[in-house]
Image (cartoon, rainbow, N blue to C red):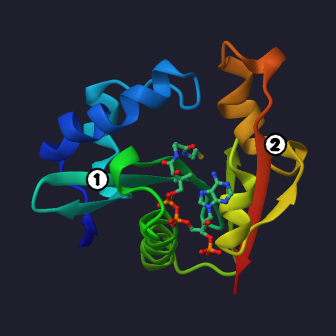
Amino acid sequence: MIRDAEKDDAAEIAALLKPYVDKKILLHRSLEEIRENAAQTVVFAESGGILGTASLVFFSPTLCEIRALVIAESAQGRGIGKDLVLAAEAKALGLQNARPMRFFALTYTAEFFERCGYERTTKDQFPEKIYEVCNFCLRKDDCHEIAVQKQVS
Ligand SMILES: CC(C)(COP(=O)(O)OP(=O)(O)OC[C@H]1O[C@@H](n2cnc3c(N)ncnc32)[C@H](O)[C@@H]1OP(=O)(O)O)[C@@H](O)C(=O)NCCC(=O)NCCS
């Protein structure tokens, strides 16, 4: 079941992110940061707990990043990642009326995003992200993430 995240989910979400933070695939987020961003996060939950998560970050009313997307290793390959991306997009479209909405992600798994309807682009298409986030990242001079985007009318 995909649902909106709640602040109380923060510890479970942090545990899902941790292996990929350790592998430097995702940036570290504090529990407080995850809690604060719960209103812009969706999760996939089964009886055993939360198995997937994806967050939104708006840089403007029409520019939204899909961030901190993780599916538990045991649940990968079931279509949950794609469903979560689509659910995150639907949530963003519900939060902001302005159109067209441009979604983007910086990722090592561009092929996965292509399966979700995204196309590859370049990071300079998102100066807001570069100025507000990337410039402060420890890996800014050694970043191999690929930019992908999708526009929804
Ligand atoms: C990448 C990730 C989110 C994919 O989630 P998932 O639930 O396993 O993916 P899905 O089952 O929804 O796959 C949807 C489609 O993408 C394809 N796909 C999934 N992962 C892929 C990958 N790493 N490379 C290429 N294609 C991939 C699937 O084959 C499927 O294709 P189809 O539509 O033709 O059937 C998940 O593997 C993950 O959490 N990885 C570790 C963390 C990570 O890299 N996060 C992304 C950072 S932005």
Q: Quadrant of the N terminus?
A: bottom left
Residue ranking furthest to the top: 138
How far from the left and from the top, in percent, is residue 4? 26, 64
The residue under label 2 is 127
**Is the CB of mark 2 within 8 Å of ligand 1?**
no
Q: Residue at x 70, y 41 (%)?
A: 108
Mark 2 vs mark 1: give the one in front: 1
Q: Is residue 72 visible?
A: no
Q: Residues within 10 Å of mark 1 (few under 14, many from 20)?
A: many
Q: Residue at x 67, y 52 (%)?
A: 105
Q: So how many labels did they put on this image?
A: 2
Q: Earlier in the sequence, mark 2 or mark 1?
A: 1
Q: Residue at x 29, y 49 (%)?
A: 38
145 over 80 or under it: above or below: above
Drawn side of residue 32 relative to residue 117, left or right = left
The residue under label 1 is 51
The type of residue carrying mark 1 is Leu
How far from the left and from the top, in percent, is residue 42? 34, 61
127 over 91 or under it: above or below: above
94 over 74 or under it: above or below: below
Q: Is residue 101 visible?
A: yes
How far from the left and from the top, in percent, is residue 113? 67, 62
Of residue 97 and residue 65, the one placed in the foreground of this image is 65
The type of residue carrying mark 2 is Pro
Of residue 59 and residue 43, the one placed in the foreground of this image is 43
Mark 1 residue element? strand
